[in-house]
Every structure is written in structure tokens, then in C-alpha cells.
Amino acid sequence: MNKIDLESTKSQRTGFVGLFETTLRKFKILTYLISMIPIYLVACLVLATALVPAIYTFKSIQNLTHLSGELVQNIGIALSLAAGYFIYGTTLMFVAPLVNFILRAKLKAWRGPYHSAESVKWFIHNGLTYLVRYTFLEFVTPSPLSLLFYRMMGMKMGSGVVINTTWISDPSLIELGDKVTLGGSVTIVAHYGQGGLLVIAPVRIGNNCTVGLKSSIMGGVIMGDGAKLLPHSVVLPKTVIPPGETWGGVPAVKIDLLKVIKNASTPAA
């Protein structure tokens, strides 16, 4: 543990927070269930708020078609349900970041037990992200709307960024430079587990980087400017990829593409 980790862990053991964490660890199942009640209530409130404009749309179309024939009414219901879903999803992409801001769930680098106050904030931040991911985000990826959502959730990114994936966790601890391309189904998580502890660590990807299809990047990873990660690669925690290098594999290591191409073109003996 570094000095910051020790200080953050120590601060969590005093006062009300310390009492909460002690209770949480002593009565894990019961305290977990009790702790989840307000979190699930927040999730219900977020979803309900996002549904309000969709319900207004549904009722408005019903009022317009209630004197029409059955066919017109059914068409109206079908259109209102379809439109309502997209209205709900778009609204949710603004409501979730707003609640994240109100609850101050923006993450910071941290290392400590899973049963702790800091992990609750981590749970809330990702829970709000997942509400959008698993109900709507796929329909607007990649698009400026998905980029706006990640920015509102705290992700830092430069200009010309393309994000063709929804498999992103801990967005407030991810930083993307200019002209970064994240390929389809890329996974980026700014956390990992180690020795029974939760480690939350920033991920930084420099300018003009490309992350290939279905690659995975874990907490604490840094990619220098112009670096490339080949498809289906896995970058382990705390890995630093120097500028301009190409990495690939499981776990990812530096790859000399010219050498690989030369060997592939050389006839077998």
C-alpha cells in the first residue's frame, strides 16, 4: 500500500464511517441487504424519472386516437410504445449522470476492503452507468450521444474520440486523449481485485491510440501517445505501454509487427 492508500484506509475507520464499515464486515449479509435498500430505491427513482416523458407520450397518443377505429388505436399504441422506449433511453442518459453528481459518486484512486464506505460509492457510480448500459446505450453506440453520456459521468476525453463499445466501468477514472479509437466490445475497467482487496486505479490512454476489437484494459494501465493494442488482447493492471508501441496477446506484451510480417511471409523449410 502506498501512502495515499494507507491514509485513505485509516480515514475510513473513524467516526460514523468507521462504525458503518465495522458493522458491514461483522454482519456482512444482513448489513449488505440493508445497505442495498436505499441504493435500489435510488435506481427505481432514476428509472421512474426517465419513464415520465415516455408515459406522457403514450397517453398523448392514446388521447388522439381514442375515438378512432381499432386499427388506428393499435397503431397508435404500437408507435407510442416504440417512441416511448427511445424517449425513456435518451432521458435516462441525462438523469443517471445528474444523480451521480448529486450523490457525489465520482471516484478517486483507492485500495481497501470490499466491505467499506468507498466501495459503496464505487457500487453506486457503476450501478448508474449499468442502468444506461444494459437498457439503452447499445442503441446509440457509437454516436455523439454516447460520448456525451460518458463525459457527464466524469470521463475525460479529447476531440475526435470514437467509442464503439458499452463495456466500460468506472468512467470517472478513465481519461482518453485526442483521436482515440476504442474498437467493438472493448472492455475498460478502472478497478481490479487483489488479495481480497478492491483496487480502484485510473486508466489513461494517450493521443492517437487505438484499442483493438474485444481487448481488455484493467485498472492502473497507461497507454502512451500513438500506442496500439491488437484485437483480443488483455492488458494487466498497472501496465505501462510506451508511446508508439504495438502490444498484443494474453497478457499483452510488446510486438514487433515488422518481424511478425517477415516471419509470416518466409516460406517454411
Image (cartoon, rainbow, N blue to C red):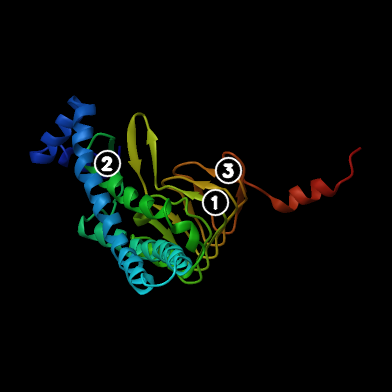
Q: Type of residue at label 3? A: Ala
Q: Quadrant of residue 176?
A: bottom left
Q: Position of residue 173 (x, y in %)?
A: 36, 54
- Name the residue: 68% across, 50% down: 256
- Name the residue: 58% across, 43% down: 252
- Name the residue: 41% across, 59% down: 175
Q: In which quarter of the image is residue 174?
A: bottom left
Q: Nearer the viewer, residue 118 or 53?
A: 53
Q: Mark 3 points at which residue?
A: 252
Q: Name the residue under label 2.
A: 119
Q: Type of residue at label 2? A: Ser
Q: Nearer the viewer, residue 174 or 186?
A: 186
Residue 127, placed above or below residue 56: above
**Element at badge 1?**
loop
**Element at badge 3?**
loop
Q: Which of marks 1 and 3 is in front?
A: 1
User: Can residue 174 be seen in this snapshot?
Assistant: yes
